[in-house]
């Protein structure tokens, strides 16, 4: 039987997020996790790890010291909602994945005009 479960989440903040906001988001999420009794305190679980196509990448990586999957899911949900609140409180926004589509027009010949 398991005695702990892994939370490993990555999310991006928009590129227009100020560095002070990124720091505050990392600090707030760290506080949230430190205040949760079931979070293993092995390491600092929150890091700003870089940049991706969508934005500024934050990683949350920690273990919950619980043995029941239902309890894990309940606590994980609570933590994710608190993280959502923390991001909103700093005035930052989550990045929305974007895609660029390139297209070119194909000119069709008109047989009547070329007649």
Image: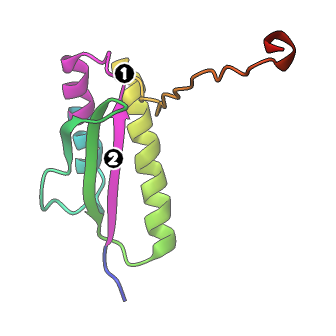
Badge 2 element:
strand
Q: Residue at x 19, y 19 (%)?
A: 19
- The disc at residue 15 is none
Q: Position of residue 80 (x, y in %)?
A: 43, 46
Tell me if residue 55 comes above or below residue 115 in the rendering: below
Count neighbours of disc 2 (C-alpha within 10 A) and say few if under 14, some if 14 to 19, many if 20 or more. few
- Identify which residue, 16 or 64, lies in the foreground: 16
| Mark count | 2
Q: Residues within 10 Å of mark 1 (few under 14, many from 20)?
A: some
Query: Residue 54: x and y, percent?
Result: 37, 31
Image quarter of the C terminus: top right
Q: Is residue 65 above or below residue 47?
A: below
Way the structure is coloured: rainbow
Give the camera-side residue of 98 and 93: 98
Apparent side of residue 25 relative to residue 83 in the rendered image (left or right): left
Residue identifier under label 1: 92
Task: Give the residue at x 43% y 58%.
Answer: 75
The quadrant holding residue 46 is top left
Residues 96 and 39: in front is: 96
The residues bearing labels 1 and 2 have C-alpha atoms spaced at a distance of 16 Å
Q: Nearer the viewer, residue 73 or 110?
A: 110
Write down the region rendered in magenta: 5-26
Q: Residue furthest left?
A: 43
* Whether residue 40 is situated above or below residue 95 in the rendered picture: below
For label 2, the residue is 10
């Amino acid at each position: 039987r398991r005695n702990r479960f892994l939370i490993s989440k990555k999310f991006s903040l928009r590129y227009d997020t100020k560095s002070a906001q990124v720091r505050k988001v990392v600090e707030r999420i760290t506080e949230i996790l430190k205040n949760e009794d079931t979070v293993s305190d092995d390491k600092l679980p929150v890091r700003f790890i870089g940049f991706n196509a969508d934005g500024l990448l934050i990683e949350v990586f920690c273990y919950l010291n619980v043995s029941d999957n239902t309890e894990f899911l309940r606590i994980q949900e609570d933590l994710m909602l608190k993280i959502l609140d923390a991001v909103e409180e700093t005035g930052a926004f989550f990045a929305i994945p974007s895609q660029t589509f390139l297209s070119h027009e194909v000119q069709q010949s008109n047989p009547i005009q070329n007649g």
